[in-house]
Image (cartoon, rainbow, N blue to C red):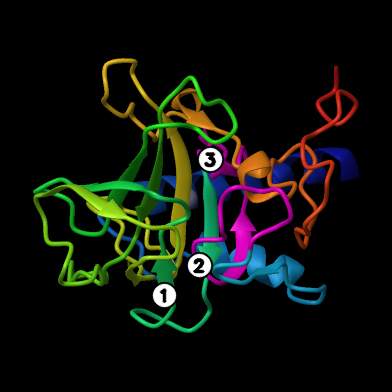
């Protein structure tokens, strides 16, 4: 009898959970759902893995492009649906406040339709000099589409030379047409070239690179230090990778 009541209650909970998920997924925009706030609440009692903009670890070629809590690292799952292709760094100061800088010298492009994003071409990967790579920076606008990218980088900018540490804009919470509301942060990723001088689609993790060796920190979901720290052994060991 007790067992069947338990089973009934479990089924009821499952149905309620599924209904809630379906409701969330079907509404055009769920303003009060925040993945970041959920993660933050899970970790807020421990040391915050705070990054400092322009910080550079010994021997690492790139500088940290912004300041904040590195809440989501390379390869983390978001809503269980995808592998995260970069780092999400949450400035915790609200929109339009926390500066975003170029992580490395290169040539910047902002496509005409880009509200909150820029991409920088690095003709020579400092770690693999035979290839060209790109660094991508997004969410630099508010929810309504007011851009926080500096005026000197208007939509349609093409191949603008920038230096490591050049100010690009400020963190925001713009998330395009997505139903999912987000908190103010920078999404930063390293993107592979298609071999013909164009960047690949960075939303697919297969087209991106683990930023750990470029920043000199363990920033891969398999072995990330939380909080991340500069360390010479910044790549995951085979044990961490489960091989
Ligand atoms: Zn992200």
Residue 21, x across and y down, in percent: 47, 48
Q: Is mark 2 within 8 Å of ligand 1?
A: no
Cα distance between the residues tagged 3 and 2: 18 Å
Mark 3 or mark 2, earlier in chain: 2
Residue for point 67% across, 43% down: 212
Which residue sits at x=86%, y=31%?
A: 240
Tell me the residue at 11%/48% (across/down).
Answer: 113
For the magenta stretch, what is the residue range?
56-85
At numbered mark 3, what does the secondary structure look like: helix, strand or loop? loop
- Residue that appears at 53% across and 68% down: 90
Quadrant in the picture for residue 203 = top left
Residue 119 percent coordinates (x, y): 31, 46
CA distance separating discs 1 and 3: 22 Å
Residue 89: give x, y in percent of width and height: 54, 63
Q: Are dots 1 and 2 in contact, CB under 8 Å?
A: yes
> In front here: 77 or 169?
169
Quadrant in the rendering for residue 39: bottom right
Residue 99 numbered tag: 1
Q: Nearer the viewer, mark 3 or mark 2?
A: 2
Q: Quadrant of the N terminus?
A: top right
Q: Which residue is mark 2?
A: 66
């Amino acid at each position: 009898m007790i067992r069947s009541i338990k089973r009934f209650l479990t089924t009821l909970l499952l149905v309620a959970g599924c209904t809630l998920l379906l409701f969330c997924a079907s509404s055009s925009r769920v303003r009060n759902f925040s993945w970041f706030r959920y993660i933050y609440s899970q970790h807020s009692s421990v040391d915050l893995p705070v990054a400092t903009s322009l910080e550079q670890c010994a021997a690492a070629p790139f500088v940290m492009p912004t300041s904040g809590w590195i809440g989501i690292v390379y390869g983390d799952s978001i809503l269980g649906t995808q592998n995260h292709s970069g780092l999400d760094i949450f400035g915790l100061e609200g929109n339009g406040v926390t500066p975003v800088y170029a992580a490395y010298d290169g040539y910047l492009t902002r496509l005409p339709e880009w509200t909150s994003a820029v991409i920088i071409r690095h003709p020579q990967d400092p770690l693999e000099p035979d290839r060209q790579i790109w660094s991508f920076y997004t969410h630099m606008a508010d929810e309504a589409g007011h851009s926080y990218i500096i005026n000197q980088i208007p939509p349609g900018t093409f191949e603008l030379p920038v230096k490591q540490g050049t100010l690009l804009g400020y963190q925001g919470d713009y998330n395009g047409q997505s139903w999912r509301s987000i908190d103010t942060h920078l999404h930063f990723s390293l993107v592979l070239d298609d071999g013909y001088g164009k960047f690949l689609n960075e939303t697919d993790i297969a087209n991106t690179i683990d930023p750990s060796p470029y920043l000199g920190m363990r920033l891969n979901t398999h072995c990330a230090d939380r909080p991340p720290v500069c360390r010479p052994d910044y790549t995951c060991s085979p044990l961490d990778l489960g091989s």
